Image (cartoon, rainbow, N blue to C red):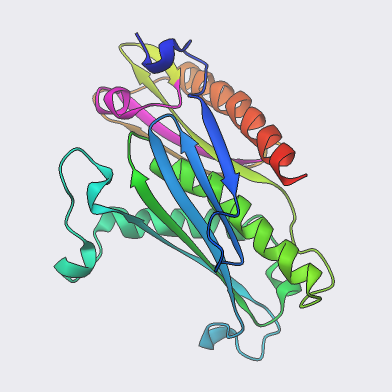
Amino acid sequence: MRSEDRKPNELRSFTIETGILKNSDGSCLVKFGNTHVICSANLNDKCPPWLRGSGSGWLTAEYGMLPGSTNERMRRESVIGRQSGRTQEIQRLIGRSLRASIDLNKIGERQILIDCDVIQADGGTRTASVTGGWIAMKLCIDLMLKKKIIRINPIIEQVAAISCGIVSNNTLLDLDYNEDSNASTDANFVLTKSGKIIEIQSTAEGKTFSKEEFDSMFNFARNGIDEIIKFQSEILK
């Protein structure tokens, strides 16, 4: 039985609460079941050195898990002295996903910094970070427009992400940790509102999977992301 007694193609209960950090230019708390992530966006007037004089801006992301976010306390990576490969891979995914959704030339030589901090983990932290990171970015851009820092909205399209996998030969949407740990195939989908693909991460963990099984995962993910994007739109009205 799935958590929350869900059907195979059903998302966990999810919420997005905006404006939770008063000192950030955009912020939200995104919850998918027992996975909770704080996402924030802040504007920096200085762009990276390699973009100076280009007229273009940049967006980058940082990701981290709090020590108490998992069953066993994690050590802070700042104490260890280096980021894990997993952390680097996830924050690059978040950055790529959000950069694909905006025209960086329209923000000028500025940088938007996205921070995604996992306060509780139960699978799907990277996809929740992309989904919440987009909301935080949108709120930051709205503030830039309101303050007339920029005059043209740079957002190209709305973006969200979700996980999908094959567990005991069944295609399942939005895997929790227990399902993810037992999946023979694990996939993460980042799509736009119109259904365009930004990124798909799909790996055979225990055995290979067929084109038909991939299509099943993609269809589940597309419908799930449609639902998430609809909710994103409602809370931003």
Residue depicted at 62% across the width and 24% down the height: 223
Q: Nearer the viewer, residue 189 or 179?
A: 179
- Relative to residue 161, is residue 136 depicted above or below? below
Q: Residue furthest right?
A: 151
In which quadrant is the C terminus drawn?
Answer: top right
Which residue range is magenta in the image?
A: 173-193
Residue depicted at 49% across the width and 16% down the height: 212
* 32 relative to 234 in the view: left or right: left
82 is within the stretch colored magenta: no
How many numbered discs?
0
- Give percent across and percent down for residue 110: 63, 79
Q: Residue furthest bottom?
A: 53
In which quadrant is the N terminus drawn?
Answer: top left
- Relative to residue 208, is residue 228 depicted above or below? below
- Give percent across and percent down for residue 31: 47, 37
Which image quarter: residue 178?
Answer: top left
Residue 137 in view (yes/no): yes
Q: Nearer the viewer, residue 67 or 6?
A: 67
